[in-house]
Image (cartoon, rainbow, N blue to C red):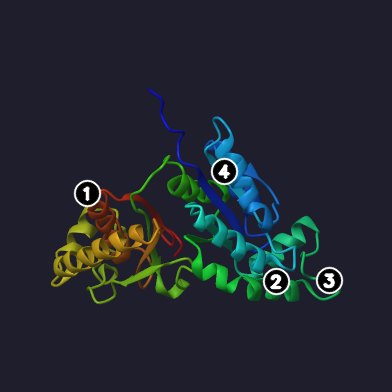
Amino acid sequence: MTTSPPRLELAIITGLSGAGRSTAAKCLEDLGWFVVDNLPPALLTTMAELGSRSQGVNRIAAVVDVRGRAFFSDLRASLDALDARGVRPRVLFLEASDEVLVRRFDHVRRPHPLQGDDRLVDGIHRERTLLIELRGESDLVLDTSDLNVHELRAKIDAAFGEPGGKRLHATVVSFGYKYGLPLDADLVVDCRFLPNPHWVDELRPFTGKDQAVRDYVLGRAGAEEFLARYSSLLGLVGVGYVREGKRYVTLAVGCTGGKHRSVAMAEEFARRLASDGVGVQVVHRDLGRE
């Protein structure tokens, strides 16, 4: 009896220059993907066709960027052609703040590919403008401004490390509003309606990872009802995400400083998501920042 070859998985790594595309490519290589760097978008269909004929190569990732001026039109045509063949790539979009991108380009002492004779910030602005539509259509958007290499690798591993995975993967991020919203958040939960343990003397030194703070936060009026209702909403949204081919979501859980309420609630959301079969990673962005 003959068996059919594994279905081809195709990923596209794109986004802003300097945001970590090369690092993402290396991560996928370590996960067993066959990675092609700097591939013209017009060649995506050719690469997919060759991959489908190859023995032992069923997970292919392509790094594409905007150095070709026909980038978006070529990419759109290639995605439509792939869709007609029943191949739907997963698109990973990497971005970072202007300040971080400028610092990274200054560090490597290289010009931006769209800079020309203008300033570096002009090249960054042109690229953001060209990619704004693609960003909105991507399966996973990662802001690497505050990520080190290990944190970026963990996120990519969660997204692409499971062969043929069909379940939802969630990153639950606790944060402090006084430090700003996480830029890559898909959904934002505000926990500031709960009493703040900061004003309880015996709890102030501890964090939301400590049992005493957790019991205090989760025991306040409205906390359990909020968790139950929002978890139910996440279940509905998650099913829709998977149905539409978006399997990665970042849930940001915020309080004033990112130390007590958001941490405790993020841990509890993660526990409930995991019990529902969701792959979960927890990141406490601002813990220890004060």
Numbered disc 3: secondary structure: loop
The location of residue 283, given as percent across then percent down, is 40, 55
Asked which quadrant contains residue 163, the reply is top left
Mark 3–mark 1 Cα distance, whole angstroms, equals 52 Å
* In this picture, residue 114 sits left or right of residue 94: right
The foreground one among 4 and 252 is 4
The tag earlier along the polypeptide, 4 or 1, is 4
The tag earlier along the polypeptide, 3 or 1, is 3
Q: Which residue is mark 4?
A: 60
The amino acid pointed to by label 1 is Ser
Q: Which residue is mark 1?
A: 275
Mark 4–mark 2 Cα distance, whole angstroms, equals 28 Å
Location of the C terminus (image quadrant): bottom left
Asked which quadrant contains residue 161, the reply is top left
The location of residue 50, given as percent across then percent down, is 62, 41
Q: Residue furthest front?
A: 1
The tag earlier along the polypeptide, 2 or 3, is 3
The tag earlier along the polypeptide, 3 or 4, is 4
Residue drawn at point x = 65 percent, y = 73 percent: 130
Q: Which residue is mark 2?
A: 124
Disc 1 packing (10 Å; few <14; some 14–19; many ≥20): few
The disc placed on residue 116 is 3
The amino acid pointed to by label 2 is Ile
The amino acid pointed to by label 4 is Ile
Q: Residue furthest right?
A: 117
Rendered view: 209 above or below 75: above
Rendered view: 125 above or below 19: below
The foreground one among 217 and 79 is 79
